[in-house]
Amino acid sequence: MLKLRTLLFLTALMLPLRALADDAAKTGTLYKDPNCGCCQEYANYLRQNGYELSVVPTEDLGGLRHEHRVPEELAGCHMAVIDGYVVEGHVPVDMINRLLGERPAIKGISLPGMPMGSPGMSGKKSEPFTVLEIAAEKSDDAPRVYGVE
């Protein structure tokens, strides 16, 4: 009976720590062109879904992408760094949540371009969004699909 009480007590102590870890994982920085409105809409979308973001306007997204080893073909409208992962473009929040939950050995994920109807973008979604992996190491292989939404 004492072991069960100890186990329950320790479990109760760990729950708030897990919640703090989850909150810490939902913080990051979004880098965007100073004149882009859809980037701000995307930041608002993430905030509405529980993310705490700093938004940094920059004229050097290309330099940041180079620094974070994001291939040109995976460039989106803006770049976020969330809990150590690069999130490139208008990636749906479910994919980011999956990334942070699974913690794969990749650099990040990308929804290249500016697909209509994606989070933060106007228009209607006309096809599924294919989110691609940003590999941890430079590769000549085609990017792998992380998920489709």
Image: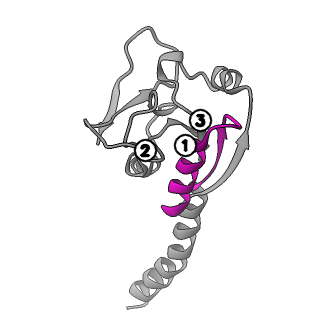
Give the SS element for disc 1: helix
Gap between marks 1 and 2 measured at Cα:
8 Å
**Front residue of 43 and 123:** 123
Mark 2 crowd level (few <14, some 14–19, many ≥20, 10 Å Cα):
few
Position above or below: 136 against 87 = above
Quarter holding the N terminus? bottom left
Quarter residue 32 falls in: top right
Give the SS element for disc 2: loop
Residue 117 is left or right of residue 87, and the answer is: left
Q: Where residue 5 appears, x then y in whole percent?
A: 43, 89
Counting residues from the N terminus, which is met first, the one under dot 1 or under dot 3? 1
Q: According to the image, label 1 marks what residue?
A: 38
Q: Which residues are magenta?
A: 26-50
Q: Where residue 9 appears, x then y in whole percent?
A: 49, 85
Q: Residue furthest bottom?
A: 1
Q: Residue type at mark 3?
A: Met
Mark 1 in CB contact with mark 2 (< 8 angstroms): yes
Q: Residue at x 63, y 49 (%)?
A: 28
Counting residues from the N terminus, which is met first, the one under dot 3 or under dot 2? 3
Q: Residue at x 68, y 23 (%)?
A: 67
Gap between marks 3 and 2 measured at Cα:
19 Å
Q: Is residue 31 magenta?
A: yes
Q: Residue type at mark 2?
A: Ser
Position above or below: 117 against 53 = above
Q: According to the image, label 3 marks what residue?
A: 79
Gap between marks 1 and 3 measured at Cα:
12 Å
Q: Residue furthest left?
A: 127
Q: Is residue 16 magenta?
A: no
Q: Where residue 22 appears, x then y in whole percent?
A: 53, 62
Q: Residue at x 56, y 59 (%)?
A: 47
Counting residues from the N terminus, which is met first, the one under dot 1 or under dot 2? 1
